[in-house]
Amino acid sequence: MSYADLRQFIEQLDKAGELTRLDGVHWDGEAGAVCHESSKAVLMDNFPGYPAGYRLLGNMLEKSLRRFCLATNWSTESRGNELTRAWKEHLGEFKPVPPRWVDDGPIMENVLVGEDIDVLKFPVPKWHEEDGGRYIGNVGIEIVKDPESGRVNFGTYRMQVHDKAILGIHMSEGKDGFIIREKYFKQGKPCPVVAVFGIYPSLAVAGSSQITHVGGVSEFDFAGWLKGMPEDVIRGRFTGLPVPANAEIAIEGEIFPGDTAMEGPFGEGSGFSEPRELPVVRVKGLYHRRDPVLTGRFNRYYPPGKGELSSNFQKAALIWSQMERAGVREIKGVASYLDNHLTVVSIRNSFAGHSRQAGLIASQCHAGDYDGNWVIVVDEEIDPCILGDVLWAMMTRTDAKRAIQVLEDCWASHKSLIDPSRPFIKAEYPLIPSKATYRSGAVIDACLPVEWDHRWHRQVKPSKELRDAVLRKWGQQLRKSD
Ligand SMILES: Cc1cc2nc3c(=O)[nH]c(=O)nc-3n(C[C@H](O)[C@H](O)[C@H](O)COP(=O)(O)O)c2cc1C
Ligand SMILES: [Mn+2]
């Protein structure tokens, strides 16, 4: 069952018992806290000071494999590493489904230009109490076009509301959006952009999956494939860029070189990001449906390995497939924790140098590199989704000097911990390239070296046959005594 827009998806969530409706929630802190507490998607209406029907959907996909499956027309019984494998195999079937240009759509029910533009006509939340402002696009997409190849790219980059027609845009250094924007700036030109705020899930998944663009594939082609139908798009009157016809809210605007404002702080999974000077979007057109629904989420701190916030199987599947495409063989599993901060790869270590190759490529491939501070490579019998076992391997199978390889000058982010010996000032990059930052990282090779005697360095536990036999005989009593 697919969905043409967010409203149909909300109906599907409702039918599946995956939706909570709340009235009277305040945009200032309460909306974020509600999302933090709820395990279901939350549809909020009747915000104080806002007309009824101006709604906010939180937790559209967060915290739920069931909602993710509804969103992607996919189903699986697999869990843990097998879930990652299943999604990776599904990704392997990807065929581009290009968008379809249409003349009109519900997004054009309300068209506002010039003085009438005011993004705060929607109940835009201050998501985390200590955020530096209200953020409209933390589950949204921003669409730009590569001026050289003509390829259309979109990603999810948060947008802080600086004024009713001025929005911050947080394209992190090295993301496709950043690279494209910089191409316009190098030519001394403004970068045209479309931002979409009430998005349906195919756009959300495509916008945050770090896909590679082999063959000029766009996130639109990926979203259409995920949803099982092409994305309908209208040509934007100011930018010529595609505007999703069935989305809830969108803007067209431009990012001018040198036009900046202080952005942040903003809560993220790894902590608060520091305020820094970042480019802004000047809004030229604002479009929205009647009774529009904003989408967004609360970014929580989470310890790796806990509950639903264990390995991110989507990210892990991407790293796995990119490693395969780079030629790494005998990969048995991949896990990705806390937005890439830790990646675990499990392989059948088949030749001297194999585990090092796997670790270095996991740490440097497109999906694994950004914030990829730590990579641990383990043998195939270690499940990368069970962190206790991963630590066991690391503790017992490594000689630190040999196992740890430190990498320098890697792809950093504003979240990276910076080497204090570097003359880097976070607020000055990306605006001043000479103040660029790098991070170090480490690959921990926790595979048994091929030359060790594998008879001895193993987990001590009864064989499966012996364990089954004992459980057949005394399982009842043994379980009782647990
Ligand atoms: C809820 C959410 C918020 C995000 N916010 C940002 C952001 O503010 N800046 C950013 O660069 N990436 C952000 N990301 C990650 C990017 O969306 C992701 O890396 C995407 O693949 C980037 O696309 P690109 O490589 O085409 O630029 C966010 C992801 C999610 C799920
Ligand atoms: Mn991209």
Image: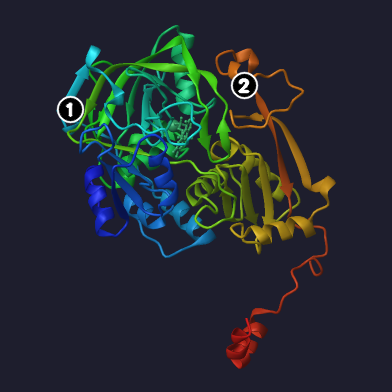
Classed neighbour count for the residue bearing mark 2: other residues with Cα under 10 Å, few (<14), some (14–19), many (≥20)? some
Front-most of residues 283 and 118: 118
Percent x, y for residue 360?
67, 41
Determine the residue positioned at 67% across, 30% down: 439
Residue type for callout 1: Met
Disc 2 and disc 1 in contact, CB within 8 angstroms: no
Left or right of 251 on screen, residue 352: right
Instruction: Quarter of the image for the C terminus: give it.
Output: bottom right
Q: Is residue 92 visible?
A: no
The residue to which callout 1 is attached is 108
Determine the residue positioned at 47% across, 15% down: 261
Would you place residue 359 above or below residue 207 in this image? below
Front-most of residues 17 and 402: 17
Q: Residue 288 sits in which quadrant?
A: top left
Circle nearer the N terminus (2, 1): 1
Q: Residue 319 sits in which quadrant?
A: top right
The residue to which callout 2 is attached is 426
Percent x, y for residue 223?
33, 40
Percent x, y for residue 178?
48, 23
Determine the residue positioned at 63% across, 32% down: 416
Front-most of residues 475 and 452: 475
